[in-house]
Amino acid sequence: MTSETATRLEGEFDYIIVGAGSAGCVLANRLSADAGSRVLLLEAGGRDNWIWFHIPVGYLFAIGNPRSDWMFETEKEPGLNGRSLKYPRGKVIGGCSAINAMISMRGQAQDYDHWRQLGLPGWSWDDVRPVFKRLDNHFLGDTEHHGAGGEWRVEQPRVQWAVLDAVAKAAVEMGIPETPDFNTGDNTGVGYFHVNQKRGVRWSSARAFLKPVLDRTNLRLETGVLVEKVVVEGGRAVGVRFRQDGRLVEARTKGEVILSAGAVGSPQILQLSGIGPGEWLAERGIAVVRDTPGVGRNLQDHLQQRAIFKVHGVKTLNETYHSLIGRALIGAEYALFQTGPLTMAPSQLGIFTRSSPDHERPNIQFHVQPLSLDKFGDPLHRFPAVTVSACNLRPTSRGTIRLRSGDPSAKPVIAPNYLATYEDRLVAADAIRVTRRLMRQPALQALKPEEFLPGSAVGDDDASLARAAGDIGTTIFHPVGTAKMGIASDPMAVVDERLRLRGISGLRVIDASIMPTITSGNTNTPTIMIAEKAARMVIEDGRSTRAAKPSPRA
């Protein structure tokens, strides 16, 4: 990639963590707790010293802003009728947890039991539930399902809307039960999402796990870093090479390199390092260190059908947004009480249900918002409206992340392959039908809902609805699976059940990319669980390695 001589970072580290996002912040906290371990944390973005990283509604300003977002885009997708989508990824300490929806969601017990059934011990629901609980600092306290002693703060939303209450009543009228908690292993029902906030302030992984321990002398954080490759010698990862302030720098480890750069960043770095599908690397002129076919494959994401309904006689955020007085009142409420619309997650009301009776458990998730807009970054509409978005929780389509070139600064080729399978197109069509049925319920008729998107002119047959899904479908930013965990006989497996890269020692991937299949809900909290669980594995394996080494006198 370059013949330039790299400056050597002084000393050797026990652990080098690439990426200070949702997973990396947890790892930095846990691995540096041992004062005898020297930890280097590398982050491409900067510090979270911007107000919109902390006021919850700041996602509106952070997404699509190069200060906080990698500004990725997908390729033009056939399943989306030739459209390309913005693909936000956090570029700041805290990563995506600094710009995401703040929705606290574990997924369904069956998601994790499926991982165990794939031959991955230690990843069943019974295995991971205690990890979730250990992380919790939950407003419900120490209960059967939640904990109170962890760093990961979970609270009730600090704003409610009459229009969302009406949608919730409509869901009940459809036979969907009310639920006070989506995080018991069964998320069937309708209710308000719990959020990762603390007294109306966004609670990112940086605030929860990293910033409280930055004064540890054995933890070093470097920001503004572009990692160019993992250095592999004799089949072992021995360091990383990165660029900072125009300088090429090399850091070495006597322990492990851990990639926590996310489902886009981690496979990108692996491929730049010569670890990936051999034919892909050859196309980019990169020498093959290890031919690992699964790197960058198996991309999964949640695609939502973003339906919009105009409403009447009820307040939505659209009107307030366009009122100077309304904006002033919102600001005053937040300044005085840390409540109100500025504390809003992108979606407040959730519904988990089945798209059709053919599914044994909920396979679609609704995100319901008291607002509407054409796309992120655009102003809200001038008419009162709600957005009722339904996503397929377990898509069967699979996409790819590939290098655009051998240049580490080049944005990767992101091809999610949305709606590529008959099954996904059918779920999308059925999801629109469920949305329409929801909005026809008696509880909503006083609001006179009018279908604005996809529009009442769109027919109810499978072909029309699948085509409409391609027109209105958009990501909810949950890419996973691009360096999946799997058994030795699986040719697409990148890491083993302890997240060690197969075929390269001293190298792990610990982030959302290791999920073999996507979880049934928002993916940030599962990613943090993965990091918490993996940190113990790293520590345990390190102890075993040291214990196995002969003593100097032997």
Image: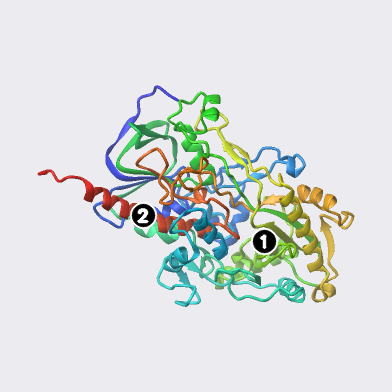
Using residue 461 as the reference point, say whether residue 358 is left or right of it. Answer: left
- Please give the residue where the numbered disc 1 appears in the rendered image: 363
Which residue is at 46% across, 56% downward? 530
Which residue is at 35% across, 29% downward? 6
Which residue is at 74% across, 65% downward? 357
Give the amino acid at mark 2. Answer: Met
Give the amino acid at mark 1. Answer: Asn
Using residue 317 as the reference point, say whether residue 23 is left or right of it. Answer: left
13, above or below 210, in the image: above
Q: Position of residue 175 (x, y in %)?
A: 74, 75
Using residue 448 as the reference point, say whether residue 291 is left or right of it. Answer: left
Mark 1 crowdedness (10 Å alpha carbons): few <14, some 14-19, many ≥20: many
553, above or below 314, in the image: above
Q: Which of 170 and 381 lies nearest the eye of the viewer? A: 170
Mark 2 crowdedness (10 Å alpha carbons): few <14, some 14-19, many ≥20: some
Sooner in the amino-acid sequence: mark 1 or mark 2 = 1
Quarter that holds the C terminus = top left
66, above or below 433, in the image: above
Please identify the quarter of the rendering in which residue 60 is found. Answer: bottom right
